[in-house]
Image (tube, helix red, strand yellow):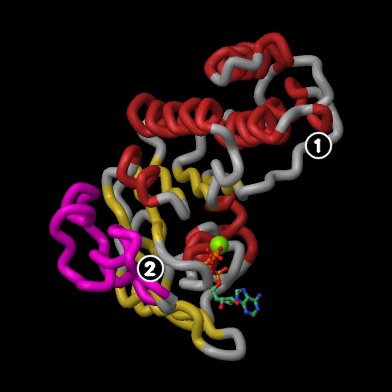
Amino acid sequence: MNGVYKKYDKEVLRVDRLELLKGCIYGIIGPSGAGKSTLLRIINLLTPPTGGEVKYHGRPVAANGQERLALQRKMALVFQQTLLFKDSVFNNVAFGLKARGYSKSETEDRVSTLLEQIGMTELRNRRADTLSGGEAQRVAIARAVAFEPELLLLDEPTANLDPGNIEQIESMITGLAREKGITIIMVTHNVFQARRIAEQVMFVHQGRIVEIGATEKIFTEPEKESTRQFVEGRMVY
Ligand SMILES: Nc1ncnc2c1ncn2[C@@H]1O[C@H](COP(=O)(O)OP(=O)(O)OP(=O)(O)O)[C@@H](O)[C@H]1O
Ligand SMILES: [Mg+2]
């Protein structure tokens, strides 16, 4: 994207330039209100920028519905608290496949494989509204990736989950990037999590991408003082 900015009452985000590499896992860190979710929503084409250009595969996205919808169908967005449908675990995960016209047997295959990967085979017929928070979030991510999006956007997907669930979700995320070449962008409040799974880390502060770089570099030799303060847990705001 080029020269993208978003203004509500005041400007909340300004990104002069950002280019994402296919198959890479990005971590977005930064204090509350920095503009992290706004950036994700702009990438997802859910929120139109006030100005500037968002490009996919090198082409600017027209504001009109058709192209935007086609691109959105290749992306998936998962929030901290995703709403599942009041239906079985299986049908929740199968939802995106049915909507995209996959055959019954292909849907069965894919959903079964995913349920196995997230350790929920036994719970396939359980109603989603009876799941624990961690189970529900694993189902939400499985539903999001069932149709193999090109881009998976995660907004604090493991907030409030226990270490076991976090570990399972993290290994799901890294597996998706490695095995399927899915590009992943994850917002997290947990800098340790960003360090564990991201290949590239973006530090966002006051509506700006202060710094983006290889994860180890951001954590050990950042260019900017504010990045250093944030990753060392010293930034006060
Ligand atoms: N729809 C909106 N109308 C007005 N202001 C908004 C709107 N959405 C976001 N903002 C403002 O934009 C700024 C950035 O919000 P954003 O949700 O992107 O922050 P964030 O980095 O995701 O924060 P958090 O870590 O708390 O989730 C905040 O000051 C927020 O109040
Ligand atoms: Mg947010």
Seen from the viewer's position, the closer of residues 151 and 87 is 87
Q: Which residue is mark 1?
A: 85
Q: Which residue is mark 2?
A: 204
Can residue 23 be seen in this snapshot? no
Q: Residue drawn 44% across and 76% down?
A: 237
Residue 181's x, y, as percent?
A: 36, 33
Magenta residue check for 229: yes
Q: Residue drawn 36% across and 54% down?
A: 57
Looking at the image, residue 136 lies above or below residue 5: above
Image quarter for residue 7?
Answer: bottom right
Q: Are marks 2 and 1 in contact (CB under 8 Å)?
A: no
Q: Is mark 2 within 8 Å of ligand 1?
A: yes
Seen from the viewer's position, the closer of residues 112 and 10 is 10
Q: Residue drawn 37% across and 75% down?
A: 208
Q: Considering the numbered disc 2 on the image, is that residue within a helix, a strand or a loop?
A: strand
Seen from the viewer's position, the closer of residues 183 and 125 is 125
Q: Residue drawn 26% across and 61% down?
A: 212
Quarter of the rendered structure image containing ligand 1:
bottom right
Please state the extent of the stretch shown in magenta in the rendering: 208-236
Q: Amino acid at mark 2?
A: Val
Magenta residue check for 192: no
